Amino acid sequence: MTIRPKKVLLIGVDQAIPCLIDKFVNEGAIPNIKSLIDGGIKGEAYSCPPCDTPTNWSTLATGATTAVHGATSFYLHIPGEPLDYGLKIRSRSSLSKYCGGEYFWNAADKHGLKSFVLNYPGGWPGNLKNGAISLLTWPLPESIPLELTLKTKKKI
């Protein structure tokens, strides 16, 4: 019988070097990370070309390739715009309205599962019915700074 976890916590570290994380865990330099690894699962992911932040965070969150999700680097060109316009709106490719894939938290939301997405560099703004997305420090256009809270059924 398979035991299904009731909660999932995904921690991603941008530009992490896996062999250094292993080294520091083994040396005892990062005991909290060791504790998370010991109580869960640690994995490595191969980069999806082009090998940069928006492309790979979108790939992780959707499971889709670059050809499907469309986040092809920091600078998104939309046909009809001047070629250099995307340079002025850095990270626009990480906005949910330009993503051709489905974020895993949106799939969970469709099934009534609660999600809280904290400072994930992609998928903003969210439209979760059973959760919230909070963007604290990641500089995305149309999003600085916003904080969302869950709706409550109880009146205080």
Image (cartoon, rainbow, N blue to C red):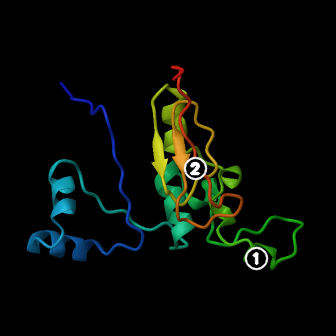
- At which x and y percent is residue 110? 55, 29
Relative to 23, 115 lies left or right = right
Relative to 4, 137 lies left or right = right
Q: In this view, does 74 lie above or below 110?
A: below
- Circles 2 and 1, Cβ within 8 Å, touching? The answer is no
**Residue 63 in sight:** no
Q: In this view, does 16 lie above or below 106?
A: below
Q: Is residue 10 above or below residue 110?
A: below
Residue pictured at 46% horizontal, 42% vertical:
116
- At which x and y percent is residue 87? 74, 78
Check residue 75 in the rendering and tell me which mark sits there, or answer none.
none
**Residue under numbered circle 1:** 88
Indicate the secondary structure of the residue bearing disc 1.
Answer: helix
Q: Which of 147 and 11 is in front in this view?
A: 147
At label 1, the amino acid type is Lys
At label 2, the amino acid type is Glu
- At which x and y percent is residue 18? 27, 71
Q: Image quarter for residue 70?
A: bottom right
Relative to 83, 52 lies left or right = left
Residue pictured at 64% horizontal, 49% vertical:
125
- At which x and y percent is residue 69? 61, 54
**Sequence-wise first label, 2 or 1:** 1
Q: Nearer the viewer, mark 2 or mark 1?
A: 2
Residue pictured at 70% horizontal, 54% vertical:
98
Crowding at mark 2 (Cα within 10 Å: few <14, some 14-19, many 20+): few
**Residue under numbered circle 2:** 147
Indicate the secondary structure of the residue bearing disc 2.
Answer: loop
Give the spatial CA distance, label 2 vs label 1.
25 Å
**Residue 150 in sight:** yes
